[in-house]
Amino acid sequence: MFRTRSAASDMQNQSSADLQREYDLITRERDRGHNALSAINAQNDIARELERRER
């Protein structure tokens, strides 16, 4: 379910709302103790993309 690679081009094709939903999903999973490095990296990638869009 989580991104297994940095997919900047894939993220650019998604709406900000979709990215925010994915970010929130990862947050919920992490809150339950699922802290896979790939999920943490994906969340960081999403946060950077959302931040870039706000500039």
Image (cartoon, rainbow, N blue to C red):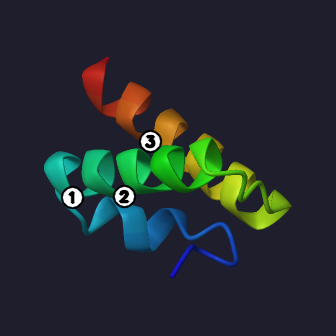
Secondary structure at numbered mark 1: helix
For marks 3 and 1, give the one nearer the viewer: 1
Three-letter amino acid code at the position of disc 2: Glu
Q: Residue 33 at what x, y percent from top left?
A: 72, 51
Secondary structure at numbered mark 3: helix
Three-letter amino acid code at the position of disc 3: Glu
- The answer to which of marks 3 and 1 sits earlier in the sequence is 1
Q: Which residue is mark 3?
A: 49
For marks 2 and 3, give the one nearer the viewer: 2
Examine the image and state in which quarter residue 3 appears: bottom right
Number of residues whose C-alpha sits closer than 10 Å to that of mark 3, classed few (under 14), some (14–19) or many (20 or more): some
- In the figure, 47 relative to 26: above or below? above
Q: Which residue is mark 2?
A: 22
Q: Are marks 2 and 1 in contact (CB under 8 Å)?
A: yes
Three-letter amino acid code at the position of disc 1: Asp
Residue at x-position 39% and y-position 63%: 11
Q: Which residue is mark 1?
A: 18
Q: CA distance from mark 2 to mark 3?
A: 12 Å
- The answer to which of marks 2 and 3 sits earlier in the sequence is 2
Secondary structure at numbered mark 2: helix
Q: Residue 43 at what x, y percent from top left?
A: 58, 48
**Numbered label attached to residue 44:** none
Left or right of residue 27, residue 5 in this image? right
- In the figure, 20 relative to 41: above or below? above
